C-alpha cells in the first residue's frame, strides 16, 4: 500500500456564537483538512488545527511546510510514512498540528484497510485482549461571562443529560466576581453534576491559590491550567496549597513536557490535545506515561472540525476506565462539522463510530463551502 495522492483544503469555520476564554474570543476556527490516498484506494483524513496559544505555528506556516514535504511522502509505503514524518517535521510543538493531521490520515487509512478502528489500532497488544470503550463521557462547555448567562447555560447542559460541566474562568476582575459566577453555576447544576474549571493560565500563582481556595466550597472536581504554562515549580506549589485537583493543559505540550510535570509532582491530571501532542500515537504515549504514574488523562478537542474531533474520540476511547469526562462536545459550537456522519452527544456521552478508521467521512460540499483557499493536490 503506497501513498499515491495527498490533497488538502484550508477552511475557516465560523463559531455559531463565538467562544470566550482567558486568551480572548474566537470568531472562527481556521485549519485545513488533509486527505491521503493509497494505491489500493484507501483514504485517510486528518485535520491541521493550529493552537498558537499552545506554542504551535499558525495555519499558513503549517501549510507552507506541507507544500514542501508532500512530494517526499508520495510513493512511500504507508507503513513508512510515519518514520518519514519524524525526519521531515521538526520534533517540537511548533509543527505538531501538521504532524497530527498527517499521522491521523495514515492511521485512518491503515485502520480502514484492516477493518478496525483507530482506537483498536492504538491499543493493539498481542499479549493483552484490551478493547476500546464503546462510549466516552464528555463535558459541556460554559464560557458565558455573566452569572445569569453562565447559570442558564449550565441549566441547559444539565437538562441535556451532561454529568460534567467545564466552566471557563479567569475572566472576572476580582475573586468575588469569580466566586459569584462559579457559585451560580454550581447552584443550577446541582450536587450530582461534576464542575470543572479552566483558567487557561489567567492567574498568577498567588491569585490561583486565593481563587481556588475561595471556590473550594463549590465542590470543584478539577481546575485546569490555573497559571501560565512553563512555570512547573509554581504549578506544583499551587497544587500543594489547595485541595482541588490540578490539571495542566497549555503546559502539557508533548511527551517531554508531561514527563517534567509528573516528575515535579505538579499535576493530578494532564489535558491531551492531538494537535499539540503531534498525533494520536504520540498522544497515546502521553496517556500511557500518565497512567503508569497515577496521573489522570483528559482528552479534549482544540475546536477542530469533525475530522479532528473524530480522531480525538478514538484516542479518548483508549483511556483506562473509569475515565474523567473528555472535552469533545464542541462541534455544535461551529457552523458546520465538515463530516457526513454526525458525532452526536446523547446523555453526556459520545459513541465510538462503528465504521473503521476514525469512523467518519469528509463532507466534500461542506468543505468547499467553508474553504479559505484553493484545494491543493499532489500525486505520485
Image (cartoon, rainbow, N blue to C red):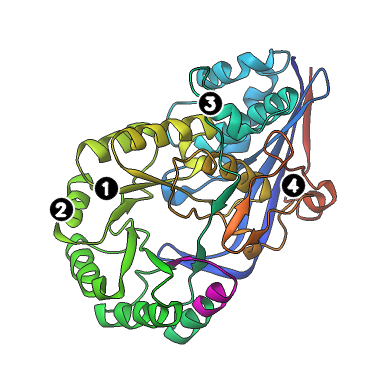
Question: How far is mark 1 from mark 3, CA to CA?
Answer: 30 Å
Specify which label sits upstream in the sequence, 1 or 2: 2
Residue 30 in the image: x percent, y percent?
62, 52
- Which quadrant is the C terminus positioned in? top right
Q: In this view, does 183 lie above or below 295?
A: below
| Residue under the point 68% across and 29% down | 116
Of all residues, the one furthest to the bottom in this rendering is: 148
Residue 38 in the image: x percent, y percent?
77, 21
Segment tinted magenta in the rendering:
154-166
- Which quadrant is the N terminus positioned in? top right
| Residue under the point 15% across and 54% down | 240
Q: Which SS class for mark 4?
A: loop
Q: Which SS class for mark 1?
A: loop
Specify which label sits upstream in the sequence, 3 or 4: 3
Question: How far is mark 1 from mark 4, CA to CA?
Answer: 41 Å
Q: In this view, does 108 lie to the left or right of 128?
A: right
Q: In this view, does 159 lie above or below 49?
A: below
Image quadrant assignment for residue 161: bottom right
Q: Name the residue under label 1.
A: 267
Q: Mark 3 points at which residue?
A: 129
Is residue 279 something that shows in the picture? no
Specify which label sits upstream in the sequence, 1 or 3: 3
Category of crowding for the residue at label 1, using alpha-carbon neighbours closer than 10 angstroms: few (below 14), some (14–19), many (at least 20)? many
Category of crowding for the residue at label 2, using alpha-carbon neighbours closer than 10 angstroms: few (below 14), some (14–19), many (at least 20)? some
Question: How far is mark 2 from mark 4, CA to CA?
Answer: 47 Å
Residue 163 drawn in magenta: yes
Q: Is residue 17 left or right of residue 373?
A: left
Which mark is in front, 2 or 4? 2
Specify which label sits upstream in the sequence, 1 or 4: 1
Amino acid at each position: 500500500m503506497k501513498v499515491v495522492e495527498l490533497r488538502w483544503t484550508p477552511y475557516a469555520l465560523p463559531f455559531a456564537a463565538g467562544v470566550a476564554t482567558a486568551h480572548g474570543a474566537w470568531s472562527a476556527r481556521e485549519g485545513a483538512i488533509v486527505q491521503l490516498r493509497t494505491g489500493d484506494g484507501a483514504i485517510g483524513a486528518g485535520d491541521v488545527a493550529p493552537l498558537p496559544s499552545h506554542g504551535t505555528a499558525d495555519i499558513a506556516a503549517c501549510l507552507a511546510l506541507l507544500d514542501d514535504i508532500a512530494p517526499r511522502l508520495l510513493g512511500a509505503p504507508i507503513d513508512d510514512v510515519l518514520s518519514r514524518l519524524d525526519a521531515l517535521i521538526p520534533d517540537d510543538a511548533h509543527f505538531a498540528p501538521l504532524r497530527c493531521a498527517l499521522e491521523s490520515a495514515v492511521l485512518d487509512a491503515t485502520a480502514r484497510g484492516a477493518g478496525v478502528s483507530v482506537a483498536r489500532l492504538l491499543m493493539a497488544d498481542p499479549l493483552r485482549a484490551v478493547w476500546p470503550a464503546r462510549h466516552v463521557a464528555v463535558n459541556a462547555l460554559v464560557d458565558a461571562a455573566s452569572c445569569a448567562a453562565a447559570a442558564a447555560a449550565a441549566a441547559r447542559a444539565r437538562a441535556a443529560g451532561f454529568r460534567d460541566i467545564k466552566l471557563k474562568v479567569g475572566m472576572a476582575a476580582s475573586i468575588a466576581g469569580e466566586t459569584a459566577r462559579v457559585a451560580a453555576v454550581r447552584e443550577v447544576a446541582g450536587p450530582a453534576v461534576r464542575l470543572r474549571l479552566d483558567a487557561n493560565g489567567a492567574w498568577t500563582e498567588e491569585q490561583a491559590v486565593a481563587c481556588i481556595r475561595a471556590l473550594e466550597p463549590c465542590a470543584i472536581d478539577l481546575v485546569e491550567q490555573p497559571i501560565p504554562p512553563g512555570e512547573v515549580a509554581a504549578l506544583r506549589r499551587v497544587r500543594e496549597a489547595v485541595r482541588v485537583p490540578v490539571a495542566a493543559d497549555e503546559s502539557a505540550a508533548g511527551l517531554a513536557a508531561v514527563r517534567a510535570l509528573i516528575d515535579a509532582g505538579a499535576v493530578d491530571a494532564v489535558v491531551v490535545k492531538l494537535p499539540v501532542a503531534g498525533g494520536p500515537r504520540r498522544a497515546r504515549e502521553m496517556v500511557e506515561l500518565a497512567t503508569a504514574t497515577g496521573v489522570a488523562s483528559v482528552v479534549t478537542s482544540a475546536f477542530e472540525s469533525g475530522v479532528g474531533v473524530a480522531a480525538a474520540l478514538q484516542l479518548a476511547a483508549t483511556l483506562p476506565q473509569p475515565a474523567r469526562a473528555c472535552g469533545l462536545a464542541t462541534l455544535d459550537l461551529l457552523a458546520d462539522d465538515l463530516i457526513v456522519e454526525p458525532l452526536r452527544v446523547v446523555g453526556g456521552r459520545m459513541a465510538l463510530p462503528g465504521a473503521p478508521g476514525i469512523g467518519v467521512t469528509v463532507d466534500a460540499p461542506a468543505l468547499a463551502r467553508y474553504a479559505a483557499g484553493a484545494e491543493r493536490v499532489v500525486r505520485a
